[in-house]
Amino acid sequence: MSSDFESYEQDFAVLTADITGRIGKVPKLVGDEKKQMVANVEKQLEEARELLEQMELEVREIPPQSRGMYSSRMRSYKQEMGKLEADFKRSRIAYSDEVRNELLGDDGNSSENQRAHLLDNTERLERSSRRLEAGYQIAVETEQIGQEMLENLSHDREKIQRARERLREADANLGKSSRILTGMLRRIIQNRILIVVLAVIIIFTTMMAIYFSVRGR
């Protein structure tokens, strides 16, 4: 299970490194070349999202006692993914200095201010999105922990119930054994009393026989 996760990690690292390099090239391109590069980056970002989904599925299959380390790594990868998407959006908006000066001329400063304002708003939206995603992830993890605790409590309850049933059976067996031993002890005492009585009768009969035998002579 962890080997699959690590394989996805390696693929994600290679892919994000390639995406980072291509994002840096986007502002320097124009026309069809820029459109092609943007399309390629969008495709790679989609592949990276799919890798994250696969990694998250693998983490859910890991035992709870070992899941914490992988969950922390997943949060780091999601943050990296959010940063890549934000950088990509900025790269699509931004133009190279040469193209900007060529298109805007003297109005470049005004356009630059507008674009800076737009980038600032975009960054705010991205930060809000990341906070919402982090909050959602915490809620999901909390729900998972709650479910695991409920399952553990259910298992513990079953174990306690089984232990109580075994105790009841043991008490019943002890009571039955006690009654059997009491009955055996009673029979032993009765047998001993009977033996003593028989011995007394035999002795008395023997003595009487001796007595009458001697007297008859």
Image (cartoon, rainbow, N blue to C red):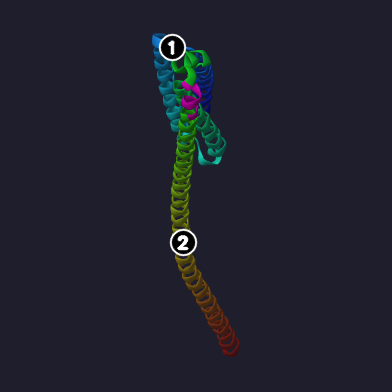
Question: Where in the figure is residue 151, as x and y percent of width and height?
Answer: 44, 49
Say which mark, if any, is on residue 115: none
Of 25 and 105, the residue lying toward us? 105
- The residue pinned by badge 2 equals 164
Provide residue 137's location: percent of width, then percent of height: 46, 41
Point out the residue furthest to the bottom here. Answer: 215
Residue at horizontal 52 percent and vertical 35 percent from the top: 75
Query: In which quarter of the view is residue 206 placed?
Result: bottom right
* Coordinates of residue 180 in the picture (x, y in percent): 47, 68
Badge 1 crowding class, 10 Å Cα cut-off, few under 14, some 14 to 19, many 20 or more, is: some
Regarding mark 2 in the picture, which secondary structure is present there? helix
Which quadrant is home to the C terminus?
A: bottom right
Q: Residue furthest front?
A: 106
Q: Nearer the viewer, residue 141 or 115?
A: 115
Sooner in the amino-acid sequence: mark 1 or mark 2: 1
**110 within the magenta span:** yes
* Amino acid at the residue labelled 1: Val
Q: CA distance from mark 1 to mark 2?
A: 77 Å
Please tell me whether residue 173 is drawn above or below residue 93 in the rendered image.
below
Magenta segment: 107-113
**Dominant SS in magenta:** helix
Q: Position of residue 152 (x, y in %)?
A: 47, 50
Q: Nearer the viewer, residue 187 or 82?
A: 82
Q: Amino acid at mark 2?
A: Arg
Question: Which residue is the site of mark 1?
Answer: 30
Q: Residues within 10 Å of mark 2 (few under 14, many from 20)?
A: few
Q: Is residue 150 above or below residue 118?
A: below
Residue 13 visible to an observer of this rendering: yes
* Residue at (59% x, 87% y) in the render: 211
Mark nearest the camera among 1 and 2 is 1
Task: Confirm whether residue 1 shows in the render.
Answer: no
The stretch drawn in magenta includes residue 55: no
